[in-house]
Image (tube, rainbow, N blue to C red):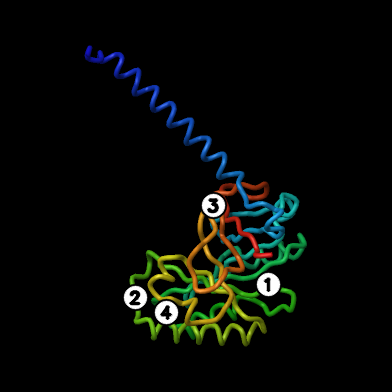
Amino acid sequence: MAARTPALLIKQIISTLAMLTIIAVLLWIFAARWAPSRATYPLQGIDVSASQGEIDWRKLRAGGADFAYIKASEGADIRDTQFAENWQATREAGLRRGAIHTFTLCHLARDQATNLIATVPREPNMLPAVLSLEFMSNCTARPDQKVLLNEIALFIEMVEAHTGKAMIIYTTKDFEDAYQVSSAINRSLWLRRMFLKPSYGSHPWVIWQANNQRRIDGITGPVNWNVLQP
């Protein structure tokens, strides 16, 4: 068997790299456009924070966003800099909207709930507030399960007294595996899995975060795309 010449080897490498590039581009295009079927999930929407920058909410609604969840606060002392603007703009665009609090294991629940309550107005037509539970790079604390569940229960109690609505718990698989929150606290679940339906959690989800690379008119860059369980 004849050995391949350096020129032939280089040509084969270039051809392979070109094919991989084409595949990567096709995957990017697929991810940017993909959303679960509207026939199965009629109500679909986004979740955003200040990281999305300025948003044209009317274009988003025209492009198929039925609802929006907007980050309001994080921990005990962080308020999303775009929350007030996004909250007002979604109302003007006619989108239903709700607020998200990102929970940190490094702050007391009472202080975090106070932060959310001070940030989000109580409105009868708002969607249920969301408690986002995931491990964060800026907090390495890992409290005992019983301690954390008690803290989460206190947070929920305080926020629900303010909003008048049962909260939704958003949790990632690694957080759920570590703390089993869904089996200990009976609240509706918002789960995350890209392109495939989530299979974790102790009971069925009501919101599925299905694509974190969706592109839609009104936002520069990718955005999280979610569907409601019909």
- Tell me the quarter of the picture where residue 90 sits: bottom right
Which residue has dot 1 on it?
A: 127
> Could you say which disc has been placed on residue 201 in the image?
none
Instruction: Report the amino acid beneath label 1.
Output: Leu
- Figure quadrant of the N terminus: top left
Name the residue at 69% across, 65% down.
Answer: 230
- Tell me the quarter of the picture where residue 14 sits: top left
Which residue has dot 3 on it?
A: 195
Of residues 227 and 152, the one nearer the viewer is: 227
Residue 49: image location, x then y, percent: 57, 61
Name the residue at 56% across, 86% down.
Answer: 158
Of callouts 2 and 4, the N-terminal one? 4
Asked if labels 2 and 3 touch by Cβ distance under 8 angstroms, the answer is: no
Q: Nearer the viewer, mark 3 or mark 4?
A: 3
Q: Nearer the viewer, mark 3 or mark 2?
A: 3
Q: Nearer the viewer, mark 2 or mark 4?
A: 2
Of residues 229 and 155, the one nearer the viewer is: 229
Instruction: Report the amino acid beneath label 2.
Output: Arg
Of residues 127 and 42, the one nearer the viewer is: 42
Residue 92: image location, x then y, percent: 77, 63
- In the displayed structure, does residue 94 sit left or right of residue 208? right
Name the residue at 44% across, 71% down.
Answer: 176
Distance, label 2 to label 4, CA atoms, is: 12 Å
Q: How many marks?
A: 4
Report helix, strand or loop for mark 2.
loop
Report helix, strand or loop for mark 3.
loop
Which residue has dot 2 on it?
A: 142
Distance, label 3 to label 4, CA atoms, is: 33 Å
Of callouts 1 and 3, the N-terminal one? 1
Which residue has dot 4 on it?
A: 107
Q: Callout 4: 10 Å neighbours few (<14), some, many (20+)?
A: some
